[in-house]
Amino acid sequence: MFCEKCGSLLIPKEKKGKKLFYCRRCKAYYNLSGKLVEKSTQKSKITLIGERKPTLPTVEEECPKCGHKRAYFWIEQTRASDEPPTRFYKCKKCGHVWREYH
Ligand SMILES: [Zn+2]
Ligand SMILES: [Zn+2]
């Protein structure tokens, strides 16, 4: 038996107890009647949605705790909405969080 796509000789291969023919070049499987079964043997893995890493922008801001000069920042609306939003910083090095005081 030959591969209908590339003409290579198919090798007998067992897959999940089923006797199939396999093309090494195309990585394709054929059943005994010469029909293409499936190309990929791998079932698509369920992608685990992990914790989304916060991709916060960074600024040059000195950490009051360790003195590191790079920090993440984000803006949060605190308490009353008529108040100006507060800038928060998080030290890239030690993780210390502080807010900007106006
Ligand atoms: Zn082939
Ligand atoms: Zn720090």
Image (spheres, grey):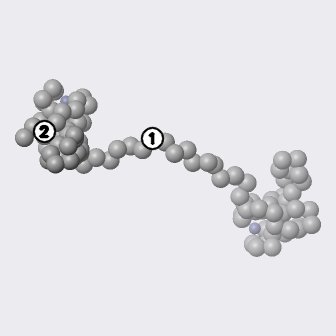
Q: Is residue 1 visible?
A: yes
Q: Which residue is mark 2?
A: 100
Q: Secondary structure at mark 1?
A: loop
Task: Say which quarter of the image contains residue 51.
Answer: top left
For residue 60, the mark is none
Return the residue nearer the eye: 96 or 76: 76
Disc 1 packing (10 Å; few <14; some 14–19; many ≥20): few
Query: Which corner quadrant holds the C terminus?
Result: top left
CB-based contact (under 8 Å), mark 2 and mark 1: no
Residue 35 place in picture, x, y as percent: 86, 68
Residue at x 26% of width, y 31% of height:
95
- The three-letter amino acid code for the residue at tag 2 is Glu
Q: Residue furthest right?
A: 33
Q: Is residue 45 left or right of residue 94?
A: right
View extreme (top): residue = 65
Image location (x, y in percent) of residue 13: 84, 53
**Residue 50 vs residue 75, the one in the foreground:** 75
Residue that label 1 marks: 51
Residue at disc 2, secondary structure: loop
Residue occupying the point 84% across, 47% down = 16
Q: Is residue 59 above or below residue 69?
A: below
